[in-house]
Amino acid sequence: MSAPSHQKSQGRAPYHEYLFDIYQDKLLRGSGPIMTTNTNLLQEEAKKVMSPEGFNYVYGGAGDGSTMYANRLAFQQWKLIPRMMKPTLPRDLRISLFGKAYEK
């Protein structure tokens, strides 16, 4: 995704403006997220990019799968609450995963 079109003086747009850019990209340009947002398809997407050994280790759920079941159940409890009409302060969307830094 490109930088938000509504950049502010501190270098980042208020977070709600990212939502408008996401919707605009999808509706006007036909481009979507870089990966699926459908949690049911995440497993198939992971299988495409992981080594068979790595995928099978995670897919196996460490034995009888009870941990995997508990994790899926916990993940399904989360609900996203859109807050499009509320301005928000600029957010720091940087994250570090497995030693690699991502800007957003």
Image (tube, rainbow, N blue to C red):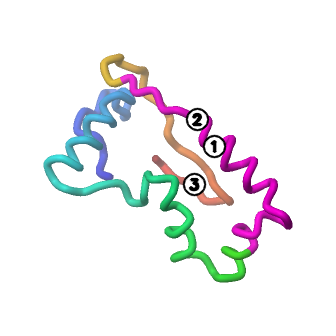
Give the extent of the magenta segment: 57-83
Q: Residue at x 84, y 64 (%)?
A: 64
Left or right of 40? Residue 32 is left
Give yes or no for contact between labels 2 and 3 (Cβ–Cβ under 8 Å): no
Q: Residue at x 30, y 31 (%)?
A: 17
Say whether disc 1 or disc 3 marks the residue closer to the N-terminus: 1
Give yes or no for contact between labels 2 and 1 (Cβ–Cβ under 8 Å): yes
Residue 57, label in figure: none
Element on which disc 1 rests:
helix
Residue 92 lies, in percent from the top left, at 50, 35
How far is disc 2 from disc 3 in space, using C-alphas?
25 Å
Three-letter code for the amino acid on which mark 2 is drawn? Trp
Q: Residue at x 32, y 27 (%)?
A: 9
Three-letter code for the amino acid on which mark 1 is drawn? Phe
Q: Dot 1 corresponds to which residue?
A: 75
Q: Is residue 98 magenta?
A: no
Residue 38 lies, in percent from the top left, at 45, 53
Q: Dot 2 corresponds to which residue?
A: 78
